[in-house]
Image: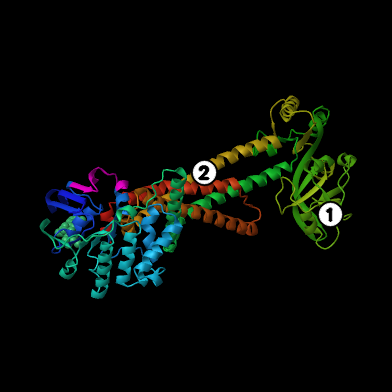
């Protein structure tokens, strides 16, 4: 007798539980010696496959002990069992169980990928095995391009790539025509002669005749166990069997890990590409989520940039004083206490560099037979300096003209094109609220701060407006430019005290570019918070979409998972593969989201130039990071459920 390599004692296996509990194997005791070619025969349903699956560590017995090389499998962890399947056993199934989206040489390599063999060596080995099995010209064919016999030879090569010391073949010829079946049997016999231990399930007595030992199973029991002839004298494969890297050097382990990771990545990408539609649907939620978040953030940024630009056109160091209690006060139009005297008082203060009044009204302007409604602003010459307004043609008012009521005016570009579409405006006379005014300047074509774009704006000296055009003694606002060296806050407080003591009450309010900036940045902050909340919600919804489709994907690919596990994939390998898939889906979805949002930005820029989108690198990076985190979080559950599958349950499902 040879050396005992497998030992089953008191093995029982039952399926189901409670009332429907059925015992399929009853007290099986077997010893398999190294180098044997064992045929297991028996009627259908007698428990042969169940026994084979237990022998191959694809399934666990309900009771009894099973020792491989003297080691009890009962005490082994899932990954240790996977290592046995990978390095010690080689499985050949009746229906080949090849992966349809991989070609022959890739199918053969799967067990060695999980064993950490480097790419060059395993490719070489796969090709040489396929050549030996007569598939030299078929290494790049997919299973669908191979006959049954050829597919079975590919699966034999797969069983051998990591050594295949014990080959388990469950009805390997069951699906083949007699000629291919004959060939497969020949290969198995040769392998046995080369030293592989072979256990074979078959119906065919002719095939059983090849074997030197025949075990008959009936109703879950060993009915007979006959040895036909002695174990042939052959070389020992054990020494060259296990090829898995055993090195404890960190570099080697890292290389093996990186290699497995790369393979997992390639497999994930292939799975995604071969299921384009499903992949796209999975991404949709993420694409829409990221796209809306990035766009809204860009919109908010664009809008606040625009406002800030407008505010800075107010100039720095300026404080506006207006009648009323606060911005938007409905009664402010009725408060008429702000006057030129206030202005004069302010001008005497050390913290005031310059001050200009504004008097605002609106009404009809005419030139020849053209008329239109315009906003008429009475201002001093300093007004233009404070707001950085420049003339395109002609000139602005002088210091004297501001106070001496000359009937002159400066018009903005819109007014020029409305009243003087075809000719020059300088030196021409127009009628403002029925009073003649000579145009001395035309402003550059640019929106003036605090005006509506497209509306007509005419600037006349405040003295002219107050004495000749509308005849009023109160003004609309005073704009103060503070002297350098005074803090805006101190200046603001001093102005407040001064005007308050002059009026005897607080019937005015002030704002400066600084305070506006501050309130804008506060508003933007709140807004950003709100957007972030919406972002989180939409991304969670997208993530749940990813999770659902991944769960479906796991269910759909249960057989693939089963095959991978049967040839030795660890739980972590399966987990990695599915996690990579979900992370990649999410990252690609995120990038597409950013891309679409930028396209949207481009379109908006053309259609609505007033609302610019301003993309920031930070928000894009955060978006992509977030989507990869979603990938991990929502991919974890499906990946784990895939990794936890029992290999034989996964394989059995179709
Ligand atoms: P054989 O391979 O000899 O044809 P099997 O080992 O496949 O037989 O099956 C033996 C018995 O166990 C059969 O009666 C079958 O119905 C039952 N069986 C096999 N697998 C399962 C399972 N997963 N759940 C319940 N019963 C099963
Ligand atoms: Mg069977």
Residue at mark 1 = 430
Task: From the viewer's side, name the closer residue of 532 and 350.
Answer: 532
- Seen in the picture, residue 522 relative to 73 is either above or below; the reply is above
Task: From the viewer's side, name the closer residue of 45 and 634.
Answer: 45
Q: Is residue 68 magenta?
A: yes
Q: Is residue 71 magenta?
A: yes
Q: Earlier in the sequence, mark 2 or mark 1?
A: 1
Q: Quadrant of the C terminus?
A: bottom left
- Seen in the picture, residue 136 relative to 72 is either above or below; the reply is below
Q: Quadrant of the N terminus?
A: bottom left
How far apart in space, not on screen, are marks 2 and 1 (Cα)? 54 Å
The secondary element bearing badge 1 is classed as strand
Q: Residue furthest left?
A: 223
Q: Which residue is depicted at the point 39% across and 70% down?
A: 136
Q: Residue 458's x, y, as percent?
A: 79, 49
Chain part drawn in magenta: 65-80
The mark found on residue 87 in the picture is: none
Q: Is residue 512 visible?
A: no
- Seen in the picture, residue 500 relative to 72 is either above or below; the reply is above
Pointer 1: residues within 10 angstroms few (<14), some, or many (20+)?
A: many
Left/right of residue 471 with respect to residue 228 in the rendered view: right
Q: Residue 490's x, y, as percent?
A: 73, 26
Task: From the viewer's side, name the closer residue of 533 and 93.
Answer: 93
Q: Residue 156's x, y, as percent?
A: 31, 64
Residue at mark 2 = 532
Task: From the viewer's side, name the closer residue of 545 and 489.
Answer: 545
């Amino acid at each position: 007798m040879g050396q005992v390599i497998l030992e089953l004692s008191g093995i029982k296996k039952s399926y189901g539980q409670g009332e429907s509990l059925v015992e399929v194997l009853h007290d099986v005791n077997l010893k398999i010696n190294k180098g044997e070619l064992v045929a297991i025969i028996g009627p259908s349903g007698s428990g042969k496959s169940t026994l084979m699956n237990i022998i191959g560590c694809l399934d666990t017995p309900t009771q009894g002990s099973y020792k491989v090389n003297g080691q009890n499998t009962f005490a082994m962890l899932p990954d240790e069992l996977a290592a046995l399947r990978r390095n010690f056993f080689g499985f050949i199934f009746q229906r080949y169980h090849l992966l349809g989206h991989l070609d022959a040489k890739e199918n053969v390599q799967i067990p060695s990928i999980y064993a950490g063999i480097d790419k060059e060596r395993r490719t070489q080995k796969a090709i040489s095995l396929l050549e030996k099995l007569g598939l030299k010209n078929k290494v790049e064919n997919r299973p669908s391009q191979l006959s049954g016999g050829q597919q079975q030879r590919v699966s034999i090569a797969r069983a051998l790539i990591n050594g295949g010391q014990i080959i388990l073949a469950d009805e390997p010829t069951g699906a083949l025509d007699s000629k291919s079946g004959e060939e497969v049997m020949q290969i198995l016999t040769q392998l046995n002669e080369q030293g592989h231990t072979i256990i074979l399930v078959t119906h065919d007595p002719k095939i059983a005749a090849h074997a030197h030992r025949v075990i008959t199973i009936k109703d879950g029991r060993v009915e007979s166990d006959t040895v036909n002839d002695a174990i042939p004298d052959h070389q020992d494969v054990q020494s060259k069997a296990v090829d898995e890297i055993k090195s404890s050097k960190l570099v080697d382990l890292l290389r093996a890990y990186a290699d497995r990771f790369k393979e997992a990545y390639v497999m994930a990408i292939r799975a995604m590409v071969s299921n384009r539609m499903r992949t796209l649907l999975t991404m949709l939620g993420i694409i829409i989520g990221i796209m809306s978040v990035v766009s809204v953030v860009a919109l908010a940024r664009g809008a606040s940039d625009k406002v800030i630009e407008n505010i800075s056109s107010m100039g720095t160091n300026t404080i506006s004083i207006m009648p009323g209690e606060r911005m938007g006060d409905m009664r402010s139009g009725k408060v008429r206490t702000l006057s030129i005297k206030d202005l004069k008082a302010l001008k005497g203060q050390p913290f005031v560099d310059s001050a200009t009044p504004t008097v605002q009204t609106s009404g009809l302007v005419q030139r020849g037979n053209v008329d239109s409604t315009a906003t008429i602003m009475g201002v001093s010459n300093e007004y233009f300096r404070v707001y950085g307004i420049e003339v395109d043609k002609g000139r602005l008012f002088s210091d004297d003209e501001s106070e001496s009521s000359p009937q002159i005016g400066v018009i903005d570009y819109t007014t020029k094109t409305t009243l003087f579409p075809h000719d020059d405006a300088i030196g021409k006379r127009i009628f403002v609220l029925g009073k003649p005014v000579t145009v001395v300047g035309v402003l550059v074509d640019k929106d003036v701060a605090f005006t509506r774009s497209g509306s007509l704006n005419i600037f006349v000296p405040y003295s002219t407006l107050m004495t000749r055009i509308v005849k009023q003694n109160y003004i609309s606002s005073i704009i103060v430019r503070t002297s350098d060296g005074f803090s805006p806050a101190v200046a603001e407080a001093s102005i407040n005290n001064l005007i308050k003591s002059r009026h005897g009450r607080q019937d005015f309010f002030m704002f400066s570019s600084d305070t506006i900036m501050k309130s804008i940045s506060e508003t933007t902050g709140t807004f950003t918070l709100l957007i972030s909340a919406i972002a989180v919600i939409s991304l969670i919804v997208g993530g749940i979409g990813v999770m659902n489709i991944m769960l479906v994907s796991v269910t759909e690919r249960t057989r693939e998972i089963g095959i991978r596990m049967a040839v030795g994939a660890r739980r972590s390998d399966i987990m990695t593969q599915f996690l990579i898939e979900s992370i990649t889906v999410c990252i690609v979805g995120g990038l597409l989201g950013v891309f679409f949002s930028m396209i949207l930005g481009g379109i908006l820029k053309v259609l609505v130039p007033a609302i610019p989108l301003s993309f920031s690198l930070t928000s894009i990076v955060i978006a992509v990071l977030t989507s990869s985190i979603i990938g991990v979080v929502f991919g974890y559950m499906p990946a784990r459920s895939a990794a936890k599958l029992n290999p034989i349950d996964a394989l059995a499902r179709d």
